[in-house]
């Protein structure tokens, strides 16, 4: 009887002592061919031209590891072509090739311009990040805002819809376009109840054995 009681106590103690090992966050890979940036102009062509803005994702992947939060400075390439200024809304649809088919999206707005040798760009993403389930965790992808600050010399000001702003000149390419690269942060948050689910079978076994021992003692 004492032997059985000892086994029950051991099983019960083990169930209460179950603890999760150090967290390992799953790998992910952003599919740059399927992920898209959709820019919708919300104003007429300003400053006598109809400049256009496009955004494309770069290939980005992260191996499984113990870091719950990481960042990159190079995820989206922005290209402004033509002359003039526009306001816009923007939506980012992110598709992962690992895990296959996992998706998430986020949105924002901003303004851009290209005039002579000077280019301006401002993007403000909403507070809600793109959320994608990766294994037992929720991966939050927060895209970086673009807010080119004021510098002395060679800058100009225009009303971007976010109050009067200064803009750094961006390098213009031979084809008459300007480019800029922005980044993102990646944060995992737990969505699975750990370690409670792992302890339930052991807890039930321990309680069951204690109940059985109690019944045997009453019969004795």
Image: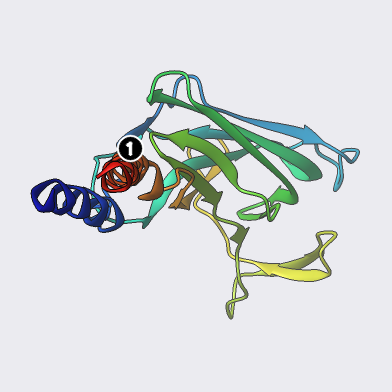
Q: Residue 92 appears at what percent x and percent y? A: 62, 35
Compared with 73, 220 (above or below) is: above
Q: SS at mark 1? A: helix
101 left or right of 125?
left
Please say whether residue 82 is visible from this viewpoint: no
| Residue at the right extreme, as displayed | 44
Q: Which residue is mark 1?
A: 201
Q: Residue at the spot x=73%, y=41% of the render?
A: 83
Q: Residue at the spot x=14%, y=46% of the render?
A: 4
Work out which quarter of the rendered image holds the C terminus and state it.
Answer: top left
Q: Residue at the spot x=55%, y=50% of the render?
A: 143
Which of 205 and 104 lies nearest the eye of the viewer?
205
User: Which colour assignment does the render follow?
Assistant: rainbow
Tell me the crowding category of disc 1: few under 14, some 14 to 19, or many 20 or more residues within 10 angstroms, Cα based.
few
142 left or right of 45?
left
Q: Residue 198 appears at what percent x and percent y? A: 32, 42
Q: Residue 132 appears at what percent x and percent y? A: 51, 36
Compared with 71, 209 (above or below) is: above
Please say whether residue 188 is visible from this viewpoint: yes
- Toward which corner of the image does residue 159 lie, by quadrant? bottom right
* Figure disc tally: 1
Which of 207 and 196 lies nearest the eye of the viewer?
207
Compared with 177, 23 (above or below) is: below
Q: Residue 160 appears at what percent x and percent y? A: 81, 59
Which of 109 and 117 lies nearest the eye of the viewer?
109
| Residue at the left extreme, as displayed | 3
- Toward which corner of the image does residue 81 lie, by quadrant? top right
Which of 211 and 159 lies nearest the eye of the viewer?
211
80 left or right of 30?
right
């Amino acid at each position: 009887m004492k032997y059985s009681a000892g086994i029950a106590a051991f099983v019960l103690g083990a169930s209460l002592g179950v603890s999760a090992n150090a967290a390992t966050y799953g790998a992910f890979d952003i599919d740059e061919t399927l992920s898209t940036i959709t820019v919708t102009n919300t104003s007429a062509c300003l400053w006598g031209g109809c400049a256009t803005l496009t955004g494309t994702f770069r290939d980005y992947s992260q191996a499984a590891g113990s870091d719950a939060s990481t960042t990159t400075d190079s995820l989206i390439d922005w290209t402004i072509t033509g002359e003039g200024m526009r306001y816009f809304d923007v939506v980012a649809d992110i598709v992962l090739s690992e895990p296959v088919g996992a998706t998430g999206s986020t949105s924002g707005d901003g303004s851009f311009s290209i005039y002579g040798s000077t280019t301006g760009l401002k993007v403000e993403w909403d507070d809600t990040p793109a959320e994608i389930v990766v294994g037992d965790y929720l991966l939050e992808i927060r895209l970086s805002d673009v807010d080119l600050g004021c510098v002395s010399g060679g800058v100009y000001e225009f009303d971007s819809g976010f109050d009067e702003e200064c803009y750094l000149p961006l390098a213009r390419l031979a084809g008459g376009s300007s480019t800029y690269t922005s980044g993102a942060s990646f944060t995992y948050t737990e969505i699975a109840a750990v370690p409670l689910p792992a302890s339930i079978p052991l807890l039930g076994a321990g309680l069951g054995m204690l109940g059985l021992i109690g019944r045997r003692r009453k019969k004795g």
